Image: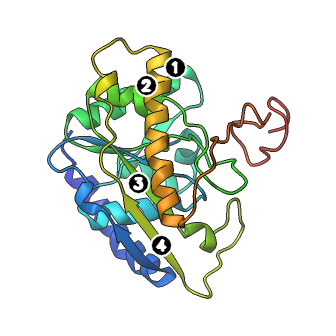
Amino acid sequence: MTEPASSRATFAVLGVILRPLMNAMMSKQWKGAENLPRNTGFIVCPNHVTEIDPIVIGHFLYNHKVMPHFLAKASLFKVPVLGAVLRATIQVPVERTTAGANRSLDVAKEAIEGGGGIIIYPEGTLTRDPDMWPMKGRTGAARLALQTGAPVVPIAHWGAHEVFPRYAKRLYLFPRKTSRVLVGKPVDLSEFRDGPITRTTLDAATNRIMDSLTELVGELRGETPPAERWDPTVKNQKQVGRNFESPAGEGQ
């Protein structure tokens, strides 16, 4: 899928509007851009700590000549103005059903096979970890990688949560914060590519992706990640929704 001229034009308009705002909001410490694949389709797997993460990652990728295409919640496409922008820039709506998720991965697969880039948050939602470390991942990114052979590039970022804390209602602009981004080398999934794509294979490949991402986050934070990754299911937390401290199946 070659990037359509209309999509590039929309990105250009957004860049003119959003880049100065992002530059004003946060200073930048970006490293590892040389690890971004060129002239091939690839999958980006970032950590997820706050709702403005996509803007941070999109800003970084766009500045490095990569048109960012996200798998985004289908409900966002119904929001006035935002939905129109998402459709114009060929973002991929994801429904929280098995059939809907499969259709989304099919669209993402077409984009990758055409040389595009797809950003998938492997955690599936904002981390539930109290200290905001990457939590247990879902298998969508691994499945797409094994189906397409596309490289998976982990991208860690830190700092956006200081501007807009998780589930906050306003920005905290002063004192000025720093957006730190670190791109890792493509994750080595070669041992998983020759056999059947089983649940065991997907779990192992997902853990490999999450290990690489967590290591990068630890490097950015200057801290040692926890020995055990946070698992919302084990902690009896809901997978989606803001009120995630409620037991699974209760509330919104």
Give the residue number, with chain letter if any, for mark 4.
Answer: 179
Q: Are marks 1 and 4 in contact (CB under 8 Å)?
A: no
Q: From the image, state whether disc 2 or disc 3 is nearer to you.
A: 3
Instruction: Describe residue 85's horizontal placement relative to residue 126 as left or right.
Output: left
Q: Quadrant of the C terminus?
A: top right
Q: Amino acid at mark 3?
A: Ile
Where disc 4 sits, the SS reads strand
Q: Nearer the viewer, residue 171 or 162?
A: 162
Q: Residue at x 28, y 62 (%)?
A: 33
Q: Earlier in the sequence, mark 2 or mark 4?
A: 2
Callouts 1 and 2 close, C-beta under 8 Å: yes
Mark 3 and mark 4 in contact? Answer it, CB < 8 Å: no
94, above or below 196, in the image: below
Give the Cα separation between the discs numbered 1 and 2.
Answer: 6 Å
Q: Earlier in the sequence, mark 3 or mark 1?
A: 1
Numbered label attached to residue 155: 3
Disc 4 residue crowd, few under 14, some 14–19, many 20+, Cα 10 Å: many
Q: Residue 62 lies in what quarter of the image?
A: bottom left
**Cα distance in 3D space between marks 1 and 4:** 36 Å
Locate residue 185, reporting x and y percent. Answer: 30, 50
Q: Quadrant of residue 189?
A: top left
Q: Earlier in the sequence, mark 1 or mark 4?
A: 1
Q: Amino acid at mark 1?
A: Ala
Q: CA distance from mark 2 to mark 3?
A: 25 Å
* Pointer 1 residue: 99
Q: Is residue 193 above or below residue 2?
A: above
Foreground pick, 21 / 201? 201
- Kindly identify which residue carries mark 2: 103
| Helix, strand or loop at mark 3 | strand
Q: Quadrant of residue 193?
A: top left
Asked if 198 appears above or below 30 in the picture, the reply is above
The image quadrant where one finds the N terminus is top left
